[in-house]
Amino acid sequence: MNYQQLEQVAMRAMIFEAVVGLIILILLFWATYWVIKAGVRDGIREAGGNRRTHERPPAPAGYRWALVKETVDAQDLRAD
């Protein structure tokens, strides 16, 4: 085996190792994504997210919920 053949074998081995390393890296990122996703999902469930509703709570007795437009006076925003 001469020097050029040895160099080609070494280059093929290096490319093979790089490809295997890249595949392992992709698999690890995929596994990390699913572990984090499951952890967030379980955390939300434990926090009571299933008991939350999008309905407004009832207004206190004698009151009603109403949207009120707030106006800001520009003079109040000035520094002294």
Image: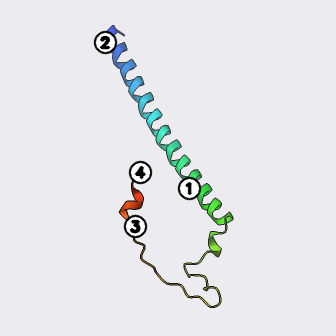
Badge nearest the viewer, 2 or 3: 3
Numbered mark located on residue 4 in the image: 2
Q: Amino acid at mark 1?
A: Lys
Q: Earlier in the sequence, mark 1 or mark 4?
A: 1
The residue positioned 64% from the left and 85% from the top of the image is 60
Q: Earlier in the sequence, mark 2 or mark 1?
A: 2
Q: Position of residue 24 (x, y in %)?
A: 50, 38
Q: Which residue is mark 4?
A: 79
The residue positioned 58% from the left and 78% from the top of the image is 53
Numbered mark located on residue 47 in the image: none
Q: Which residue is mark 1?
A: 37
Q: Amino acid at mark 3?
A: Val
Q: Earlier in the sequence, mark 3 or mark 1?
A: 1
Give the alpha-carbon distance from disc 1 to disc 4, as whole Å. 47 Å
Give the alpha-carbon distance from disc 2 to disc 4, as whole Å. 78 Å
| Mark 3–mark 4 CB contact (< 8 Å) | no
Q: Amino acid at mark 2?
A: Gln
Q: Residue furthest left?
A: 4
Colouring scheme, one of rainbow, by chain, secondary structure, one colour: rainbow
Q: Is residue 63 above or below residue 49?
A: below
Numbered mark located on residue 72 in the image: 3
